[in-house]
Amino acid sequence: MAISRRDFLKVMSATGAATTLGTSSAFAKNSAMIIENPREKYPNSSFVENMYRKEFAYTYGRKEEHGTAYHCVNCQGNCAWDVWVQNGIVTRENQAANYPLLNPKIPDANPRGCNKGVQHSQVMYEKDRILYPMKRVGERGEGKWKRISWDEAITEVATKIYETMLTVGPQGNYIHLGAGMLTEARAASGKRLGTLLGAVRPYIASYVGDMFPGVSLVYGEGNIGFSYDFVYTANVQIWWGQDPNKSRIPDAHWVWEGKYNGGKVIVITPDYNATCKSADLWVPVRAGYDGFLAMSIINEIIQKKLYKPNFIKTFTDLPLLVRLDNKKLLRLSDIDTKEPMFDKEIFHNMEEKAHGKHFEEHEVFLSYNLKNGKLTVMPGSEGNPVKTLRLKDVGWDIDPALEGVYEVKLKDGSKVKVTPVFELAKAEAQKFAAEKVFKLTNVHPKIVEQLAKDIALPKVVTISMGFTIGKYFNGMLAQRAIASITPLCGRLGPYGGFNSENEWSISGLDIISGFGGKYQHRFASGFVSEFVLGNMMQDFDKLYEEDTFKQVMGMSKAEYKKKVEEMLSMSEGDKGVNKGKPYWNDVQTFLLFADARFRRNKGTSYKKAFLEKAKFIAYVDFRMSDFANYADILLPAKSHYEVWDLRTNPGYHRFANLAHPPANLKPVGEAKSEWEICTLIVEKLQEIAMKKYKETGDKKYIKIPDPQFSKTGYRDLDKVVEEFTINGKLRTDKDAVELALEHTEQFKPNTIESMFKRGGYLTLNEKGGKTSPLYPDKPYNFFENNLYLYEHFETLSGRITYYVDHELWIQEGANVPTAKEPIRPRKYPFVLLTPHARWSIHSTYKTSTILMRLQRGKPYIMINPEIAKKKGIKDGDEVRLYNSLGEFYAMAKVYPSCPKDAVILEHGWEPFFYKFRKGHNETVASPLNLLELSDGWGHLKFGGNWDGNQHAYETSLDIEKV
Amino acid sequence: MSKRQLAMVMDLNKCIGCQTCTVACKTQWTNRNGREYMYWNNVETHPGYGYPRNWMEAGGGFDESGNLRDGIIPDMVLDYGVPWDYNHDELINGSLFQAKTDSLEWGPNWDEDVGGGEYPNSYFFYIPRICNHCSNPGCLAACPREAIFKREQDGIVLVDLERCQGYRYCIAGCPYKKIYFNPKISKSEKCIFCFPRVEKGLPPACAHQCVGRIRFVGFLDDEAGQVYKLVHKYKVALPLRPDFGTQPNVYYVPPLFEPPKFDENMQPVEGSRRTPIEYLELLFGKEVHTALETLRKEQEKRARGEESELMDILIAYSHRDMFRLDNNYYQQQVDKKLKGSEFFKVIDQRYLQGANTKRVEIKDYTFHEKMLPQKDSSKAKHH
């Protein structure tokens, strides 16, 4: 029953007036309030107004007491925040939003931030904060603790480290800052400590599976690309295996502003994700077949002649000649240079240009010069002192052939046929013609045709590749194939090209993290050291099917295992350094910071194996994570608003941010910064060692031999304090920030004060770019120096690399870009996709009450409605997911954008979220890929650019209602 | 009508569903004092149930002849969802991390990204929602106490908490269900457009902190402002559910961006729409057709390399230019009424443009901190 509005108002205001009259004394009014039209005017507005004004004033506090911060976690977003404080308690955070508009025609970077960063103030006072140093008194994981003093805790940690150095040697210690601690100043603390003591440190990007080895292969560097404002300028933006709307929240606005600016947005992912919803084209590639799609695009570009011949002749290895007898690149050391077919004149001119520098003949490569029909030395390679990539210069004019078969006379007089890499790459790509692979990729040939045109023809095109691609067992090959597409079309620098993740060149940080090369830590391969620590071969055995594995990999599981064991036996311990992927098997004492070890490692074997090996675990974190439970000593760390810190990389934008605690901040428990903790450990270590030395008079108690990793031959424990603290100059987090600012060229001219005043950031100066100038008013993209100045790439051939003639690569048919199928078991129908989450940074902030309330309150798995119906599963039901390796339980979310052959679970849930403490990684194995294990070919040498990945996406499972 | 109306435009094409706005609002206002379950700002996936669940079906607002429609008060458990807590304090005892409730059944973002359609032709988009600060508020009309009012100076709708008796007619009367009952104080509370921030020169938390840069804030009569231009000049920003009759002052640029559907052979169907246009019509009225058409044409113009003021506005080069808080106007109000009040001391100089306020033009943005006006413009006026 509806009454007319006028009547309603009449009745209601009459009632209102009556109430007011009847209870006037209760409201302390002298007379009834007369309200004529509250839409226009209201007599009693100030009561409620002042109430809210006061509330706001309370949260805001005083501007001069505010701090600045960003969140030192592994999203790497790096956003400047204004931290509000009242009476020494942080009330909330608001983006500083003060980054400059670099160019009035390109959107600025404000207000960088996200849904996670915006609530750290709530998490920092949550009840899971570790407040005091604690010692375990029950069994590991039992949850029985005793509060101890800082001195007791540090004594225990230092003693264990010392004893390990004496009994096992420096390699018995494992000092590591996990992925929850990735900033320049703060993370340098543990790195410095580990380096000083010669401890083992694994490579983070590798063990979390966020490496781009396939990209390193092609460009000589894995982390390359643009500052995100660059996509605004692109005619076509392709997001491959990436969901910027979810996983690059502070940067996503440039995608859509770019679309308003006339750009086309294409997303290539198996699921219709949050970025797809606004794209111009979504390409629904089948999970794990990205490499096949990339190869079919390469084929289309070659077949339709959309490539740029002059570009690829100059900048890629495609014109280099390959011997058809053994598939090896033809090297200067192979051939008879007296033969008339060899172009002596050009070689002579290059020798002259080399000014007497030696040609390493096995790293000098040849092409067939169409100008004179001769074999010609190509400039730019590792063994050629002439580094320019110019094909026409004073002394030479080379037009290398891309096609044809030629005959060459070798040193021993025999003749072999050779052909340019291009021919072999073309032939391999043909195997992946769009019609042929349609059934595997789910991508219609018409789309491949369109993609090839969209990549080749417009002025500026970017292909940005996400971390998901490397998460498949054969993902490295897919990364390589995807990274290989854009160079065919001449895309570098201002023309766009491939993007994984830009890194700025930041020099001078060694002052806080290192010792000028005097000492080295034991830098271990990430994926290998975790594999070995966790006994993960067992998981491989249990999960994978013999037939499938053999069909995909061309070898039996046993053959594979034998090969892995052979390779691993080469690279173990001090003697294994430079012989593959290094790892140390005798680690036993662990000092770990912010490292969700049992969350991120795959399989069912890891936890047990690790706990057996770890004789002592000291764990530093600000909150009680799942892993914290297994520590022997727990140390409370300060969190992001309580410390001084500095962060630049990676290069999504060009600003270095400053963490500057608010004034008069009240301490949270007895938390200390990582720098303070490391300084205390070093001081205690020296004290203990000196005591022992004084007692015994034996120098062995202060001189720990370490000939391989210390230039002095020893770890001198009587001097560690002065060395660690640079004679007292570097003891705290603030000291680290000041020193970093003082010594880093790219930060100049800046001080804490200038950064703070600006809103907690500085803009990198022109020296920040690695392979392009960093112009003050233009978005950044890689490789402009190569394109315009003909600088060589950091690869064996000095060129963008398509060909690898490492023996194992030839055996596996991976000498040219190719693709291989997933090895996931076929008997389970659903591939498990665990992409980066919208609601957490890996495990960080997963336990936030505010954020959990905006999800489902516990882990949930997304399944296609049709599958749900078939399995009798309703939205909200509890389901069990299982395979031959393990099982886990979660809530089902029925989700139309999920493909029918996959289930999706945003990753990052720690085991303690799940029933029986069985995390989803219980169903995931992460075998080592042999090609990623291979080492020692040209630029494929172990280091930051060449390690391998753990593989989160290489499993399949079945699902049932509980 | 209030003298002036402060309004917001949200561009749904740029909304990425990150909910930074939701959380910014929560820490600013609703993480305490009986407001915990409230989301003065929420973001919901459409098509979907929304928050509170099925709010579009819960009545309130006005019918065609201007009569208030019946409405219901949503259920705490089934519609709002009880905000669950966790056992953080037990983790140190080796406990699993668990919600302190047996039933996780519904929450403010329960159907996140679900939307409609079937793979591979599914679809969804986000709608962030705050109080619409309507010109004809349903809550105000429904309040038997006449305790709800529009601020004279900017049309922000507030509940007079001194006079509110907690009858909750307002909740039934608001067709957007954007007014909430605070069980702790037994009164109704709602989004206040962050007026205490605005008065001091800081945009509302949800808008200022929106990382998708989808929100414009300004006075509707400020013809030089983006809000005016999007709403009145280009008519691409539309109120949500105009049929509810409350005349909202929050406007949306409707979703234009989406990829084509696939046919049975997995070929994209050119020119196809995923989101049914009828659904957009339901949300934004018939005007959605012309709005989308205008957007499409201007986008094409831009793609051809031509100038487009509309695209320039939506791109929003400078974050600070998205907000025109016209602080001189507030200062004039202060001068009239509350001279010298601490509440009106400007704490941020950056967002002060508007019909009554001139901002110093910042030419060299690289060093803008040096170029900001050093003094309050109000102070200058006193001299």
Image: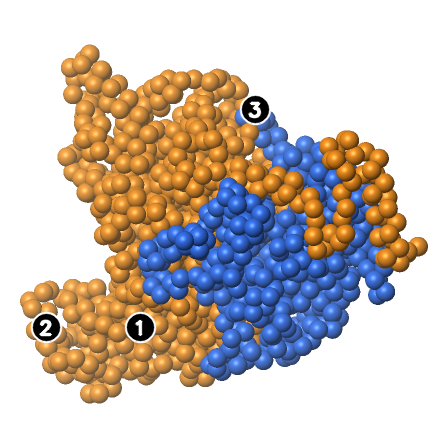
Chain colours: A orange, B blue
Q: Are marks 3 and 1 on the same chain?
A: no
* Near-viewer residue (A77 or A457): A77
Say which residue appears at 88% left-offset and 49% top-offset.
A11
Sequence-wise, which precedes: disc 1 or disc 2?
1
Q: Position of residue A467 (x, y in %)?
A: 47, 56
Say left or right for A133 vs A362. Answer: right
For the N terminus of chain A, the quadrant is bottom right
Q: In this rendering, which labeled residue sits more in front, label 3 or label 1? A: 3
Circle 1: is it few (<14), some (14-19), or many (20+) Cα within 10 Å? many
* Three-letter amino acid code of the residue under disc 3: Asn
Asked if residue A272 can be seen in this view, the reply is: no
Say which residue appears at 44% left-offset and 35% top-offset.
A639
Please give the residue where the numbered disc 1 appears in the rendered image.
A316
Residue A677, numbered label: none
Q: Which residue sits furthest right?
A: A1
Say which residue appears at 40% left-offset and 43% top-offset.
A68
Circle 3: is it few (<14), some (14-19), or many (20+) Cα within 10 Å? some
Residue B93, numbered label: 3
Say left or right for A77 vs B338. Answer: left
Please give the residue where the numbered disc 2 appears in the rendered image.
A353
* Near-viewer residue (A223 or A339): A223
Between the C-alphas of marks 1 and 2, the distance is: 22 Å
